[in-house]
Image: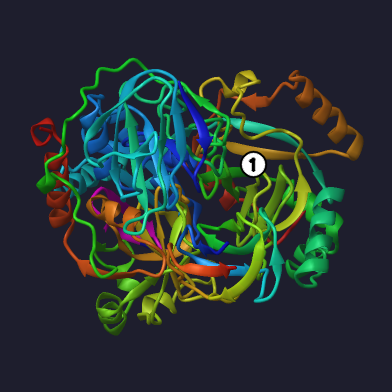
Amino acid sequence: MIYPEPKFLAGGDRFVLIEFGNEMNLELNFMAQGLATAIAGQRTKGIVETAPCFASLLVHYDPDQISFEDLQREMTVLIRALGPSDDIVLDSRLFYLPTMYRDPWTRACVEDYCNKITKKEPDPEFVARINGLSDADQLVRVHSGTEYWVASLGFWPGLPFMMALDPRCVITAPKYNPPRTWTPQGTVGMGGASTAIYPVATPGGYQIFARTPVPIWDTEKRFPVFHDSIVLFRAGDRVKFVPIGKEEFEFVEAKVKEGTYIYNVVEYQKFSVRNYKTWVSVLDKTKRF
Amino acid sequence: MIEVIKPGLETSIQDYPGRIGYWAQGFPPSGPMDSWSFRLANLLVGNSADAAGLECQFVGPALKFRDATVIAVCGADMKPTLEGQSVPMWESVAVGAGQTLALSFATVGARAYIAVAGGIDTPSWLGSRSTFHKAGVGGMEGHALKAGQVLPVGTGDGTPGRKAKAEARPLFATEKIWHVEVVAGPNDDWVDEAGHQRFLSSDWKLSAKSDRTGFRLEGPQWTFTAKATNKAPEHGSEPSNIIDQGYPLGAINLAGQTPIILVNDGPSMGGFINPYTVPSAAFWKLGQARPAEILRFKAVSAEEAQALRREIDRACSQRNIT
Amino acid sequence: MAEDVTTQVPGNVWKVLVKPGDKVNPGDVLFILEVMKTEVAHEATQAGTVKAVNIEEGQEGVDAGTVAVIID
């Protein structure tokens, strides 16, 4: 449900969680990001930083500069000024990420889990089956067939949580129980309705079925795209996974190692919620790629 | 320059208030857990508030100072010695060129802070020298100190023999019980009345499996309201599962039935509820609690928590250094 | 020469590697504690025979400064 009025929930002495609703709905994330952008634009006094998540915005404030009540008042004014969520327009970069689906590294990782922790069906076949897809090939077609909206970063620095923008490509996947103790760096996986990319080899619980050779964080700033940030993504970016084979993977990997890889990022687009919703409304959601 | 002779259990470079402004990228603030003791140490050696120092956990390091300087050790008593001679805590102490400061293990409290005049001068990383070891950023090559490393020191102006007034120091728990303030929320309405009663009246034991990422607590079961069970399936199947949300620093995160207090190096978001949050004024208590000690939680309002925080700010000021 | 080996950190006992009667040399790991997800090995500093072991594997919440192993 989208709340008629957002809820302001105190988080200790310095945080407020602003909840826009309680369901997995892109609209709630558009509202969270719209508010974050408005706060950044206004440079609201006393707000240290904000962090959007799926259906909420976490605000970190300085109680010596603004009280919880005044913050709530300011935020309510900004939210009203945003207008209906349909009016929201956000700058949105688009990244084309070369990605090998059904790669050997995630397969080996899952096999290791089966040997050491508990048996499970291989992830690509499992995810295809539970979503009513004909096989893992269709999973590749469907998963890679849409742009993904970066709703939030977190859990690990730079780890993006993304939602499929094309409703015909929405699939879901339960999390591992118990979780894996490791995941190859660059793995692309799914948990619930969200897709994530593992920046480094962390433990994890998402179903895994692809891998990108392109770094999504870079402490050494070896590539121009990391000039202003060691983390590649920010909320509001879109990602298109471009399926590649093993040879192309190795080619890109070598370019990355050399430091000559050129990131494919499009930076002239704005994302209009109204246009998006209009487009979604004319799609035949019963058909898959 | 400071040479690391023995690194201690896990000693790291930290600064206050830590790495701020990168929560949206998933970077926690890191920084000293007991910032009260840390700030007093910096004041004692004449440093500016943003100078970096060392956080020592349970077993402290042995450090050789190449140049004469002034240091101060505050926090848990790790029985500091200089060239084998005992030196006082909560006071600035002159160190001669080539002398070694050694910290032993704490028996009361968990963390001690070493400030050196001029501060530790490692490169700043996203605005802070604090160490975030999980991601290998900040501090000394991104991790805790290792034997043989040499730490650069800035130019300082310290005076030995300065003392932090006793009334301006944190008062450590006696009888291994800590009374920790908490503010209800953000997800307090997911826990039922009995669950709140139980949380606020029980003894919660700090697990040894706790670290700067999270403090794991052992205690009774939590019980929930309808909100935790009548929810859209995308939240997840456990009562404590919620659609991924931002986590406030200090959130008491309920992973299934295990409460984990998210502290300085913790995750910025996730899919579990946070019925209570430990406010910044109580963090020093977390920083000094030892495994197997008991935490008892006391509910306060956000305003009360903010007032407590201002009291600590007043304590950490020049007028309390004699 | 007798040696009391005390715990240097508070924590849980992860492994106990000796029992009474065992001969030990300097540097032998006697037991390993776990705290902050870190293993802290405790070694003998002198040669001798283990006289008593006061801790057991799986024991939780052992305080620092506890006499864990006595060596004769």
Residue positioned 61% across, 58% down in the render:
C44
Judge whether residue A10 is colored magenta: yes
In percent of width and height, residue A176 lies at: 67, 66
Residue positioned 44% across, 79% down in the render:
B229
The image quadrant where one finds the C terminus of chain C is bottom right
In percent of width and height, residue A207 lies at: 71, 60
Query: Left of A258 or right of it: where is B119?
Result: left
Q: Residues within 10 Å of mark 1 (few under 14, many from 20)?
A: many
Query: Left of B139 or right of it: where is B156?
Result: left
In percent of width and height, residue A76 lies at: 23, 47
The picture quadrant where one finds residue B297 is bottom left
Provide the residue span drawn in magenta: A3-22
Chain designation of label 1 = A
Query: Going by the picture, which residue comes out furthest to the right?
Result: A247
Residue at the spot of label 1: A199
Query: Going by the picture, which residue comes out furthest to the bottom?
Result: B194
Using the image, determine if residue A268 lies above or below residue B290: above
- Say which of B38 and A140 sits in front: B38
